[in-house]
Image (cartoon, rainbow, N blue to C red):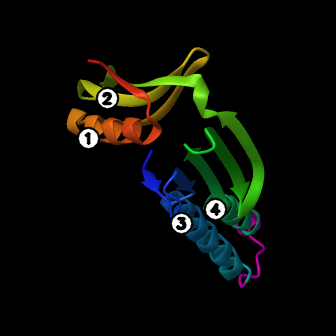
């Protein structure tokens, strides 16, 4: 999670969009559709042409949905709330929760398994009695420590390291 300050000094926000994966679907879908159109020039009526004409636009539509995906989390320290927004082009769902339920920010060292063996990730989370909200993770402790210090100062919440 890459949290950035906004124009309002009392609000930090995290934004997430569909990203590069959407381009893969858009290009693949367009290519398949155009390949299907090229197959229409054949007089035989190849069944693969029909499949390409159906799959191409379907994959293109999936890419459009992924590209239009928006997710935002705002941390408002003045109003003491967290505002979560999810949508496609426009907000579809907005939820709010109190910031006061979070008692501390914690950095935890977590062992992960990979194809080349195990490695460690450092996760920064907001901690409450009802559960944690993972903010971000990194393989570099220094990055997580710097982020957690800045974020705990911003929210005036205690920082705890479980390393």
**CB under 8 Å between discs 3 and 2:** no
Which of label 3 and label 1 is nearer to you?
1
Sequence-wise, the earlier of marks 3 and 1 is 3
Q: CA distance from mark 2 to mark 4?
A: 32 Å
Q: Which residue is mark 3?
A: 23
Whole-angstrom CA distance, mark 3 to mark 4, is 7 Å
Up the image or down, 87 lies above or below 26; here it is: above
Q: Is residue 46 visible?
A: yes
Q: Which residue is mark 4?
A: 63
Given residues 30 and 38, the one toward you in this image is 30
What residue is rendered at 35% in x and 36% in y? Answer: 148
Mark 4 vs mark 1: which is more N-terminal?
4
Magenta stretch encompasses residue 93 = no
Q: Which residue is mark 1?
A: 143
Q: Secondary structure at mark 2?
A: strand
Q: Nearer the viewer, mark 1 or mark 2?
A: 1
Which residue lies under the disc numbered 2?
122
Q: Tell me the quadrant of the picture where the C terminus can be found.
A: top left
Which residue is situated farthest in the front direction here? 78
Q: Quadrant of residue 23?
A: bottom right
The residue stretch that appears in magenta? 41-52
- Identify the element where label 4 is drawn: helix
Tell me if mark 1 has few (under 14), some (14-19) or many (20+) residues whose alpha carbon lies within 10 angstroms of its own.
few
């Amino acid at each position: 999670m890459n949290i950035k300050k906004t124009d309002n000094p009392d609000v930090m926000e995290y934004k997430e969009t569909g990203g590069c994966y959407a381009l893969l679907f858009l290009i693949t879908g367009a290519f398949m559709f155009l390949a299907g159109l090229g197959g229409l020039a054949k007089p035989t009526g190849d069944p693969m042409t029909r499949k390409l004409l159906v799959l191409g636009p379907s994959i293109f539509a999936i890419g459009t949905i992924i590209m239009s995906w928006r997710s935002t989390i705002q941390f408002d320290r003045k109003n003491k709330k967290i505002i979560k927004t999810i949508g496609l082009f426009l907000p579809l769902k907005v939820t709010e929760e109190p910031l006061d339920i979070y008692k501390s920010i914690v950095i935890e060292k977590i062992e992960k398994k990979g194809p080349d063996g195990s490695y460690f990730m450092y996760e920064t989370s907001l901690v409450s009695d009802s559960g944690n909200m993972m903010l971000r993770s990194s393989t570099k402790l220094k990055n997580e420590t710097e982020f957690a210090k800045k974020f705990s100062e911003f929210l005036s919440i205690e920082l705890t390291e479980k390393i």
